[in-house]
Image: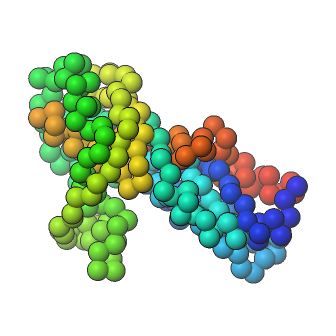
Amino acid sequence: MKTEEDYKNGQVLLIDKPLKWTSFQVVNKLRWEIRQRYNIKKIKVGHAGTLDPLATGLLIICTGKKTKIIDTYQGQIKEYTGTITLGGTTPSYDLETEINETFATDHITDELIHETTKQFTGVIQQKPPIFSAIKKEGKRLYELARKGETTEIKSREVMIPVFEITNINANNLDFRVVCSKGTYIRSLAYDFGVALNSGAHLSALRRTKIGDFHVENAVSVDVFIKSLEAE
């Protein structure tokens, strides 16, 4: 049984983020529920690493004094699974925006797909998507992108120890990626399409691990709220 003091002293909560929720929506919902349950006027709640609205999976939420150590979780190695769809690109590199350009895929073999993954393992240079939460001159890039404004984005160094294609179903490639902080899987999908002399976008994404934390040990937002009510 958790108490008000437990949440104020700090809890590390493992939440399985629902599809179409932003990470901030999850934080705001949990903060509101904790405040309501214990009649608390103010409590700090934060997340350790954003997940895109169209991604599901592990979100580490810290409360109270534990928010001071969020950085230690943000810097840990992460694992994702998902699907890359060949033959078309989108401005956001995922399904947030519609396909804006189509490409041939009949030259792409299973062997070429597996061989091309090698270009994206180890230390690589990667450009974040224009639709991202990175700030430039005080504004988040996705705010500029949604207004149709373009901006130059610098490449950054990221580490990808594992990038493997786990299943090929026509133009849909299921994958598993293990990567460092700051890696954009949407950019990986886009760049992978370019490397195949085609185009690609991310059509599904799930974060399965952050460091030693696994999504199998996470609970949904609804289950967490029910557990609060039972306390």
Quarter-wise, where is residue 52 in the image?
bottom left
User: What residue is shown at x 33% (from left), y 77% (from top)?
Assistant: 139
Q: State whether residue 18 appears in this view.
A: no
Quarter-wise, where is residue 154 in the image?
bottom left
User: What residue is shown at x 42% (from left), y 54% (from top)?
Assistant: 181
User: What residue is shown at x 13% (from left), y 23% (from top)?
Assistant: 106
On the picture, is 136 further left or further right than 88?
right
Name the quadrant of the N terminus.
Answer: bottom right
User: What residue is shown at x 32% (from left), y 21% (from top)?
Assistant: 169
Residue 183 spot, x, y in % from top left: 36, 51
Residue 109 spot, x, y in % from top left: 19, 19
Seen from the viewer's position, the closer of residues 189 and 71 is: 71
Seen from the viewer's position, the closer of residues 115 and 113 is: 115
Indicate the colouring scheme.
Answer: rainbow
Seen from the viewer's position, the closer of residues 59 and 160 is: 160
On the picture, is 76 further left or further right than 219?
left
Residue 212 spot, x, y in % from top left: 59, 43
Residue 99 spot, x, y in % from top left: 22, 46
Q: State whether residue 72 appears in this view.
A: yes
In this view, which residue lies farthest toward the front?
A: 123
